[in-house]
């Protein structure tokens, strides 16, 4: 995922969804925030992603125009980019446990 050098108007906060990566689903920040970091435990499987940090870019008041973008994750490469002016707001995993089971990211523009 390509990081953006964007100031955030609040401290990064955990998502409070610590079990989100335990099963196949979209894991997203609430309240119109972008994912700005991940926290994982010591193992290498997807359920080891324990939580993620969320924050809202400076000046943003809401979210508009969201889309799902397919990804090609592997241990050697992560090919997942939101279009220009979009931010990662969600990560989707399938039912398997390896990193290549992350099959999509949710990208949204902020208003």
Image: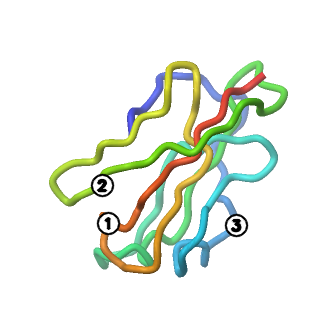
Mark earlier in primary sequence (1, 3): 3
Mark earlier in primary sequence (2, 1): 2
- Residue 28 pos. (x, y %): 65, 55
Query: Label 3 crowding class (10 Å Cα cut-off): few <14, some 14-19, many 20+?
Result: some
Give the structural element (helix, strand or loop) at label 1: helix
Circles 2 and 3 in contact, beta carbons < 8 Å:
no
Picture layout, residue 66 above or below residue 18: above
Circles 2 and 1 in contact, beta carbons < 8 Å:
yes
Q: Which of pointers 1 and 3 indicates the residue nearer the eye? A: 1
Give the structural element (helix, strand or loop) at label 2: strand
Q: Classify residue 81 by image quadrant.
A: top left
Q: Which of pointers 2 and 3 indicates the residue nearer the eye? A: 2
Q: Which residue is mark 2?
A: 73
- Residue 21 pos. (x, y %): 53, 73
Q: Which residue is mark 1?
A: 99
- Residue 26 pos. (x, y %): 61, 62
Left or right: 47 as drawn, with respect to 88: left
Report, in whole angstroms, how far the alpha carbon at label 1 lies from the one at label 3: 22 Å
Q: Which residue is mark 3?
A: 16
Report, in whole angstroms, how far the alpha carbon at label 2 lies from the one at label 1: 6 Å
Give the structural element (helix, strand or loop) at label 3: loop
Left or right: 97 as drawn, with respect to 55: left
**Which residue is drawn at the image coordinates 54% and 43% (left, top)?**
36
| The disc label shown at residue 7, or none | none
């Amino acid at each position: 995922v390509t990081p953006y050098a964007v100031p955030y108007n609040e401290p990064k906060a955990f998502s409070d969804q610590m079990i989100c990566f335990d099963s196949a689903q979209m894991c997203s920040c609430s309240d119109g925030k972008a994912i700005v970091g991940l926290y994982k435990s010591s193992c290498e499987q997807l359920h080891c992603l324990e939580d993620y940090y969320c924050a809202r870019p400076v000046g943003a008041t809401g979210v508009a125009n969201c889309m799902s973008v397919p990804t090609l994750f592997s241990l050697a490469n992560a090919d997942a980019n939101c279009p220009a002016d979009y931010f990662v707001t969600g990560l989707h995993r399938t039912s398997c446990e390896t990193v290549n089971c992350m099959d999509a990211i949710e990208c949204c523009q902020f208003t």
